[in-house]
Amino acid sequence: MQRSLFLAAAVSLTLAGCATTTGAPARDGLDAVARDYVVLQLAIGEKEEGYIDAFYGDAGLKTEGQALAQASDLPALAGRVRALQARVTPLAATEPRRAAFLSAQLTAAATRLRMLQGEKLPFAEEAQGLFGVRPTLNPLASYDPVLARIEALVPGEGSLADRVEAYQNRFTIPREKLETVFRSAIAACRTATVENISLPSTERFDLAFVTGKSWSGYNYYLGQYRSRIEINTDLPIRLSRAVDLGCHEGYPGHHVLNVLLEEKLVRGKGWTEFSVYPLYSPQSLLAEGSANYGIDLAFPGARKARYEAAVLAPLAGLNGEEVARYDALLDALRDLSTARNTIAQRFLDGEVDEAEAVRLTQRYQLVSEARARQSVNFTKQYRSYVINYDIGRDMVARDVERFPEGKARWQRMEQLLSEPTLPSDLQG
């Protein structure tokens, strides 16, 4: 108890500069702001489990964050966010992109603290505050022509969702073959990536299969160029998910993003703010968007279907002759992806209840009831975070595809992943 009180007093003195809103203290600079930013984000993370997605910085900063959390309630932390924001503003002229990144991250922290204190924000306002993008939501009826197109791809009796589910189930990877298939897929994703992006020789990942999650895959970045990739096996995993998750969670997705940030910014420039990753922040739009677009970058055109048919299907004991048709169906289903945002908005804004959200998910995502419930559970847990997957992907795709196919696109992707990139930096 005495040690906790001492630490609380110490961190209060260390961060005294954050408590003023009268401007930057003497000899203030972005390095000092960045240090206080890390401690403050870690303190917020002590108030909400899962708020911090990754931290691999100085252990002393973690201790200070814990002490600050013990000494502060949520309104006090919100005040510190405002004070730190005020310190960033006059420093923008020195390193504008770095300052803009810190400012956007602090706006997200302020928004999340409002939510943690019980404020209910409309879906679009919440997304704007947390992720820096105000989503454009399409009415669900606008997806009916896509459903009609998919209807022609999977003819037969019963509901379209049941037919699509039954067809996709033909490509389920047997449980005992999951690790072999996934390791092969991740290796192929890595090969495509390292041919175009130079990574540290010591980078690596561990792979684990888990249950009881609302997500299908997760990358836990551990620092020192290491990740733990977890794959959720609550529901049967189809063949296409091996490459999708291998690229998304690994190469050139989350693992590569974090490795480059650590190598180029934390170690290369000493920018300590990038040693912490708050999940509810504009960083996530770039992280999820680039990870999803990374699938197409690593496996452009028909390459993915050819690889799945020639390599992964035999490893899984599946018939590779149907993979091209399966891939065509998946391409069509992608045109339904943004319907998830509309369903999430209607559910979170109280326009429909959970049962209706599940029904709409079945209809407009063409999944089984079990998969629809998992999707709605994800929305209940992560709320407007869902926009980052498809809106983020489309934003990254438009930016990267301004460049000629091939090396130039990989160079642009590497640039986005290794700089303080915000959604507003994405062009196209």
Image (tube, helix red, strand yellow):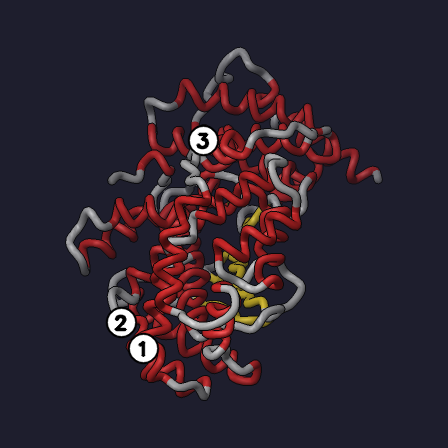
Residue at x 68%, y 24% (from the top left corner): 76
Horizontal side of 285 relative to 97 (left or right) equals: right
Residue at x 41%, y 78% (from the top left corner): 184
* Mark 2 neighbour class, 10 Å CA radius: few under 14, some 14 to 19, many 20 or more: few
Q: Are marks 2 and 1 in contact (CB under 8 Å)?
A: yes
Nearer to us in this view, 365 or 384:
365
Which residue reaches farthest front? 157
User: Rounded to the nearest whole Å, what is the CA distance between mark 3 and mark 2?
Assistant: 38 Å
Percent of width and height locating residue 118:
69, 30
Horizontal side of 415 relative to 107 (left or right) equals: left
Percent of width and height locating residue 332:
35, 60
Occupied quadrant, residue 2: top right
Percent of width and height locating residue 164:
46, 68
- For label 1, the SS is helix
**Front: mark 1 or 3:** 1
Horizontal side of 147 relative to 3 (left or right) equals: left
Is 369 located above or below residue 321 in the figure? above
User: Rounded to the nearest whole Å, what is the CA distance between mark 2 and mark 1?
Assistant: 6 Å
Mark earlier in primary sequence (1, 3): 3
The amino acid type of the residue labelled 1 equals Tyr
- The residue indicated by pointer 2 is 303
- The residue indicated by pointer 1 is 307
Occupied quadrant, residue 201: bottom left
Is 412 located above or below residue 46 in the figure? below
Is 105 located above or below residue 343 in the figure? above
Residue 359 appearing in the image = yes
User: Rounded to the nearest whole Å, what is the CA distance between mark 1 and mark 3?
Assistant: 40 Å
Q: Which numbered marker is on residue 104?
A: 3
Residue 106 appearing in the image = no
**Front: mark 3 or 2:** 2
